[in-house]
Image (cartoon, rainbow, N blue to C red):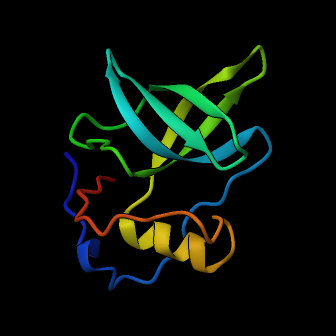
Amino acid sequence: MGKRSNNENGSENHQPIYKKDGQEYAQVVKVVGNDTLEANCFDGTSRLCHIGNLSPKEQINVGDIILIKLRSHQNSRGDIILKYTSAEARNLKSYGELPETAKLADTQVLHTE
């Protein structure tokens, strides 16, 4: 069973997970349905992304920052690995991982572990 994080106000100080080779940060643009959404990746490409092994309680909304695994055989598609909390997204931006032009939503996030 998942736990609610006390991180809704960003008071917890832990490092966000950074992207690796074959991964990219993205921002959700549209929820398409059937576990699929459209996201603008910060490499400049718009991709259809499949929601894979995230917890059913972890909802993904328009404006959320996510980490996706790129598909080597389909550049226009990816698979969601992780959804960042608003505090983690702010940290990524302050560390220079996200571009300064990224607009982050200040929403409360349910984070499961």
Q: How many marks?
A: 0
- The picture places residue 79, in percent across and down from the top left corner, at 55, 28
Judging depth in this view, the residue of 48 and 4 nearest the camera is: 48
Q: Residue furthest front?
A: 101
x then y, percent, for residue 39: 51, 37
Q: Position of residue 47 (x, y in %)?
A: 59, 28
Q: Residue at x 80, y 44 (%)?
A: 21
Q: Is residue 4 above or below residue 96?
A: above
Question: Which quarter of the picture shows residue 98?
Answer: bottom right
Residue lying at 21% horizontally and 57% vertically, measured from the top left = 3
Residue 102, image quadrant: bottom right
**Rendering coords of residue 81 (x, y %):** 52, 39
Residue at position x 42%, y 30% from top? Answer: 53
98 left or right of 49 in image: right
Residue at 42%, 39% in the rendered image: 29
* 16 shown above or below 27: below
Image check: 55 left or right of 73? Answer: left
Q: Quadrant of the N terminus?
A: top left
Is 32 placed left or right of 41 in the picture?
Answer: left
